[in-house]
Amino acid sequence: MVSIKTGHVQLEGNISIPKGAKGIVLFVHGSGSSRLSPRNRFVAEELNKKGIATLLFDLLTQEEEIIDEKTAHLRFDIGLLAKRLVETTDWVRNSPVTNNMNIGYFGASTGAGAALVAAAERPNVIKAVVSRGGRPDLAGRRLVEVKCPTLLIVGGCDEPVIDMNRDAMAQLKSKKNLVIVPGATHLFEEKGTLEVVSVHAGNWFLKYLGGPKQE
């Protein structure tokens, strides 16, 4: 486990670095979730198998999570979450272990909105974004400022979110693609659907972050 200093708070995270990794993916979880999300951990493990490093971290402190469980307002504070993500990105860039790696974001649900805002904030740093069941609409006007290749993955049964992602596709100016996974709902709990997400995400990150360094 690592402790990440961002502003006035410390955030907890789990980092995994396969041998020869050229890229690292920061996971931005959705509302009410954490770095322990089984779905994001599954995707992270699949990326690790492809030689891609991962960082799963909590966007909120333990105290903030207790407050958010009662009020549910911090999880939708996209400005705060994007700021924390940018600060975590700078932490990754300054770490001697990861400072030579290309950086990408994997955002789930509301976390995808924060990931896209942060990508707009660091256009020369973030090389790729993947959104799973994401809410790109929460990025608002920053969506058109995203410069990196962006992959939007949505469940075929998640109809309102499909429309949101189609609207986002029309606004994005960067390289982009929309993948609709048949039979999947918002959380991709159906058998085999998360595996499909992992394959698409892995291919996207390998293409734009690079694969493991060759010995």
Image (tube, rainbow, N blue to C red):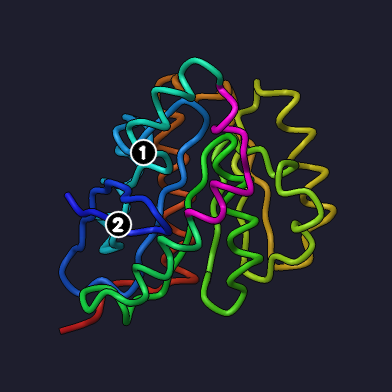
Helix, strand or loop under label 1: loop
Q: Residue at x 54, y 52 (%)?
A: 130
Crowd class of label 2 (few under 14; some 14 to 19; many from 20; radius 10 Å) = some
> Split into 4 quadrants, where in the image is the C terminus?
bottom left
Q: Is 174 left or right of 92, judged from the image as shown?
A: right
Location of residue 142 by image quarter: bottom right
| Magenta stretch secondary structure, dominant | helix
Above or below 207: residue 213? below
Q: Is 86 left or right of 117, judged from the image as shown?
A: left
Between residue 186 and residue 83, name the one nearer to us: 83
82 drawn magenta = yes
Q: Position of residue 150 (x, y in %)?
A: 62, 59
Q: Is 85 left or right of 131, judged from the image as shown?
A: left
Q: Residue at x 15, y 69 (%)?
A: 19
Q: Disc count in the image?
A: 2
According to the image, label 2 marks what residue? 4
Above or below 90: residue 56? above
Above or below 107: residue 192? above
Going from the N terminus, do you reach mark 2 or mark 1 first? 2
Image mark for residue 61: 1
Location of residue 194 by image quarter: top left
Amino acid type at mark 2 = Ile
Image mark for residue 214: none
Q: Residue at x 63, y 49 (%)?
A: 79
Q: Position of residue 78 (x, y in %)?
A: 63, 44
**Magenta-highlighted residues:** 72-84
Q: CA distance from mark 2 to mark 1?
A: 11 Å
